[in-house]
Amino acid sequence: MADRRANIDLVFRNGFRDFEVLPPPEVWESIQPAITVTKKKIVFPFYKVVAAVTVVATMSFLAYRLGVEISTSQMNDLTSQNRELFTPELVSDPLPVVIPVVKKVTESISPATGVAVADIPEFEPIDISGSISEKNSIDVSGRFITDNMLLPGIQAPVNARYAKVNSPELEAVTYQALQDNMEMPSTPRWSVSAIASPTYYSQFSSSGNELARQVIESDHTRASYTGGVGLSYKISGRFSIQSGLYYSSLGQEVGGVNAYSGFQQYDNSKGDHNFEVITAAGTVYTSNSDLFLNSYNLPARVQTYYSNDVFDPVKANLTYVSSTIYQDMSFLELPVILRYKIVESKVDLNLIGGMSYNFLINNSVYAEKDGIRYPVGTTEGLNTVSLSSSLGMGMEYNLSENLSLNLEPTFRYYLNPFNSGKTSGFHPYSLGIFSGLSYKF
């Protein structure tokens, strides 16, 4: 009897379950003038356009620099090949070399003018032809003796004597010989890195009605984290491409939704779920029949047959759990990132830009009290695959030739909405500072 008095609302509800009363026609005539039609505001997707322009500009700049680097590398390779093809080699059998030697200079008097004229000197050739490597020394001593007594202005003969002229043995020098004797430093092209980052998420949202706008304002994203392993390949001196596998989480805090346990004994519905909660990320469908949900601040966000005017959890002595439910979403990321090295020194500075595919692997909603989680259900309408863009700067401190410490502030924006519903468009963005170690090989 006591339970019957405590649940008098249920008695009346069951008694009038099939009772219907139609209002008089004049009531509708009074309501009709009070109805106002609100015009939908056109929200210009400014942030989408800015994000798309930023990604396109970044990818275009990186592609341009990649083309310049590849062209320069090809030109250097062609120059090296031409240098090897046209490197002169010393021959072992040169052409004959003839050294003219003055034997004697004579003087005669011209009959017409009476002036002394020097006769054309006679030359004695010396043949030193042959292989330079075979003629190590040439003795030309005593061969450069001239009688200068007959030359005007010279009082004494001048003896020009030369000792042996040594010709060292020369080897043919080729480009391959220079390559063998030169130590070329090997530059590592591959690198593997392990990075992790605490990530702050926020959102750009567009909505089509007043309820959706109120829901978006009341929901808050939580600090999450991202981590994984990346593999990078150095295309040229400044360009590299990176991929890998990362795990990322995104948390959503839905405030103003009260959760009570112990509702299973009052659950008489035959449907698959008792409550639907509208959130910015999508609609939550409950799967735990023991939890009762309601909202006093925004009652319209909790859709159920057990509304506040039908069922009172306090009168039913249900156990209060919390006034907040939490949405957890986890993704596996497959990125394709281009890096351009702006500054190359002890601390390298890189420009980072690319795209990532995000695969949904976890979708859960829960309430929490004293460290104990009470499962609520899942968020319906989430896209299993989403596409995000990223842009950031990377600082790389070289600890050694192969080991470096990385610090990368990165901004990411999700291009397509998280949910496929028509209530709101949930476009989260994140700001994270990735840090980790990379090994080059």
Image: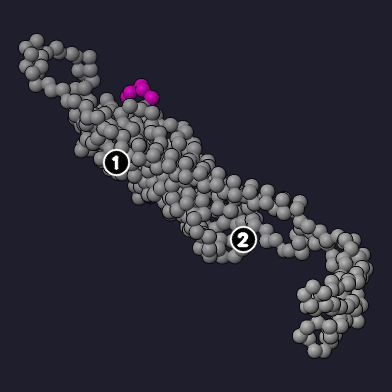
- Where residue 433 appears, as percent x and y from the top left, is 43, 54
Residue sitting at x 39%, y 46%: 430
Does 269 lie within the magenta span? yes
Judge by depth and name the residue closer to the eye, 5 or 93: 93
Judge by depth and name the residue closer to the eye, 257 or 175: 175
Q: What is the spatial separation of the Cα atoms under label 1 and label 2, in whole angstroms?
A: 46 Å
Instruction: Identify residue for label 2.
Output: 402
- Taking the view exactly as shown, the residue that stands out farthest to the top is 25
- Image quadrant of residue 10? top left
- Where residue 402 appears, as percent x and y from the top left, is 62, 60
- Taking the view exactly as shown, the residue that stands out farthest to the bottom is 156
> Which range is magenta?
268-272
Image quarter where the C terminus lies is bottom right
Q: Is residue 133 above or below residue 248?
A: below
Q: What type is the residue that disc 1 sits on?
A: Asp
- Image quadrant of residue 121? bottom right
> Is 148 left or right of 261, judged from the image as shown?
right
Judge by depth and name the residue closer to the eye, 33 or 50: 50
Q: Is residue 111 above or below residue 396?
A: below
Residue sitting at x 87%, y 83%: 147
- Secondary structure of the magenta portion, mostly? loop
Instruction: Identify residue for label 1.
Output: 219
> Is 37 left or right of 390, judged from the image as shown?
left
- The kind of secondary structure element at disc 2 is loop
Query: Do the residues under discs 1 and 2 have CB atoms within 8 angstroms?
Result: no
Does 90 lie within the magenta span? no
Q: What type is the residue that disc 2 sits on?
A: Asn
